[in-house]
Amino acid sequence: MGKQASSEKIAKYSDWLDTRFKIPGTRITFGLDFIIGLFPVVGDILSFGLSGGLLLVMVRKGASGRALSLMILNISLDALFGSIPFFGDIFDLFFKANKRNLNLFQSHFEEGKHQGSAWPVIIVILLVLISIFILIIYLAIKLVEWFWQLLS
């Protein structure tokens, strides 16, 4: 299979996941990722798995570490925010991680962008995750203090 045929299959898969259907009377598109994500927990896990499958195909096609780290960031953001009830479903309509990853994949191979090491992206991701973790701990402490005051 040639590079062009492979790229077309990846584009078709991405289209089915993110933009295959259109809300009538609008420019808003959605795909199976949105539909599957409507089912709490199971849908989010399945959606994450489908996005991961697309990522694996891109790995086998030789995407650079930097491109892959940006793709992982897109999938992680989609999984994180997409798992929030109601808000996550709205988020999925507009974020379209698989389409973003397709654009990264195409710009990597067609234009030579996103070459190099993944470390700069990984460091930023780790800093963001550590910040989120600290924020969650802080909010949990504040919540416990608030409940303690209610009980007193």
Image (cartoon, grey):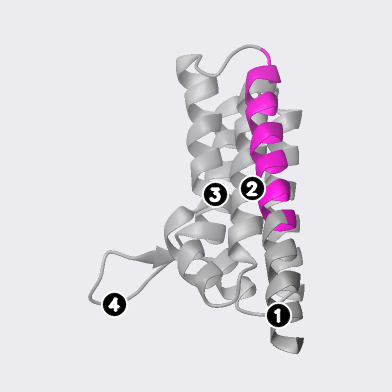
Residue 24 drawn in magenta: no
Classify 10 Å Cα crowding around label 4: few (below 14), some (14-19), many (20 and above). Answer: few
Say which mark, if any, is on residue 149: 1
- Mark 4: which amino acid? Pro
Graded by Cα atoms within 10 Å as few (under 14), some (14 to 19) or many (20 or more), the crowding at tag 1 reads few
Secondary structure mainly formed by the magenta segment: helix
Residue at x 47%, y 54% (from the top left corner):
95
Q: Earlier in the sequence, mark 3 or mark 1?
A: 3
Q: Secondary structure at mark 3?
A: helix
Q: Kindly give the residue lying farthest to the bottom in the view shown.
A: 151
Q: Which mark is residue 24?
A: 4
Q: Which of disc 2 and disc 1 is earlier in sequence?
A: 2
Segment colored magenta: 117-137
Q: Who's the residue at 63% across and 29% down the image? A: 124
First in sequence: mark 2 vs mark 3? 2
Along the viewing direction, whichever of 148 and 136 lies nearer the viewer: 148
Q: Residue furthest left?
A: 25
Residue 97's disc is 3
Q: Position of residue 55 (x, y in %)?
A: 69, 41
Residue assigned mark 2: 75
In the structure shown, which secondary structural element does the residue marked by tag 4 occupy? loop
Q: Nearer the viewer, mark 3 or mark 1?
A: 1
Alpha carbon of mark 4 to alpha carbon of mark 1: how far? Answer: 51 Å
